[in-house]
Amino acid sequence: MLLFYLLIFIFGAFIGSFLNVLIDRPARGETVFWGSSHCEKCNHKLVWNDLIPLWSYIRLGGRCRYCRSPIPFWLPLVELTTGLMFVLISYLFGLTSGIGFSAANIVSLFHYFLVSSLLLVIFFSDLKYHLIYDQIVYTAIGIALLYHLLCLFMPNVLPITHYALPITHYFLSAFFSAAFFYLLYALGPKIFHQDTMGLGDVKLAFLMGLLLGYPKIIIALYLAFLTGALVGVILILVKKAERKSQIAFGPFLVGATFVAWFFREGIWEAAMTLFY
């Protein structure tokens, strides 16, 4: 079992290396699928042993082999995060879920791998560049829709642990979440005299509803606004931001999505216990 999780971690780290391409290249105006990897400082082409996830960063002491400039810490962080995320997904929805290597479980597992990877791209691209790429959100929405349709029309593909809700809960959650965020986007400049949301957040809210359904979407939005407000207050107190500073909200939405998605009904039951 330990070897299995180690292999999953390595697989996730390699996927994380590709996610770095999806995060950085569009923001720099570079193509994703063409062009070789290169140092951001000296533009020297990187060879294969410069690109081994995590290991190359450690072996090179966090510096470019050619110009000795520091390698951005974001790169190994994304690789590490993706590897750990894949291990967590495998633990929660893989072998230990009780259905083993069935076709249903494999379909579900890769669905979680794909959507989680795209959510991580959204998390880091918004954190680093204040950008949520349409192509990434639309791809994630397409994957989520395809998975819902598979579960609806091919119930044998459906893992036992997936649906506790009617499929309409997911679609209604998506539309109402997007509508709520669109109101914030449209009314923010009029009420607060500044942009409070971007259209990227509206599309991300639609994706969240598709993934979570009701009532988990309520918990996710509550967590996102709560953590966003707390971090904003802390940044103001330590003088890292001002009251009218714009803080990327995408990372809070993605983080809350992971919490509500992975911990399923348990988080709703905990909330009900807390409030009632």
Image (cartoon, rainbow, N blue to C red):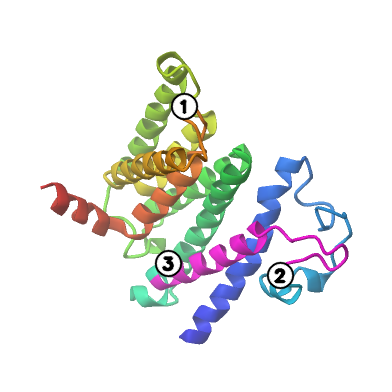
Magenta segment's dominant SS is helix
Q: Which residue is mark 2?
A: 57
* Structural distance between the alpha carbons of marks 2 and 1: 37 Å
Q: Is 41 placed left or right of 236 in the picture? A: right
Q: Earlier in the sequence, mark 2 or mark 1?
A: 2
Magenta stretch in the rendered image: 62-91
Residue 6 position in % (x across, y down): 54, 80
Q: Which amino acid, by three-letter code, is at mark 3?
A: Ala
Task: Return the residue found at the far front.
Answer: 238
In the image, 166: left or right of 148?
A: left
Looking at the image, which residue is at 53% across and 44% down? 142
Q: CA distance from mark 3 to mark 1?
A: 41 Å
Q: Residues within 10 Å of mark 3 (few under 14, many from 20)?
A: some
Q: Determine the secondary structure under disc 3.
A: helix
**Residue at label 1?**
196
The residue closer to the viewer here, 55 or 179, is 55
Left or right relative to 90: residue 14: right
**Can residue 98 be seen here?**
yes
Q: Which amino acid type is shown beneath numbered disc 2?
A: Tyr
Above or below, comparing residue 209 to residue 58 in the picture: above
Residue pictured at 64% horizontal, 64% vertical: 76
Look at mark 3 in the image and give the residue it sits on.
104
Q: In front here: 6 or 113? A: 6
Q: Residues within 10 Å of mark 2 (few under 14, many from 20)?
A: many
> Which label number is shown at residue 9?
none
Q: Which of the two residues, 160 or 76, is positioned nearer the viewer here?
A: 76
- Can residue 139 be seen in this snapshot? no
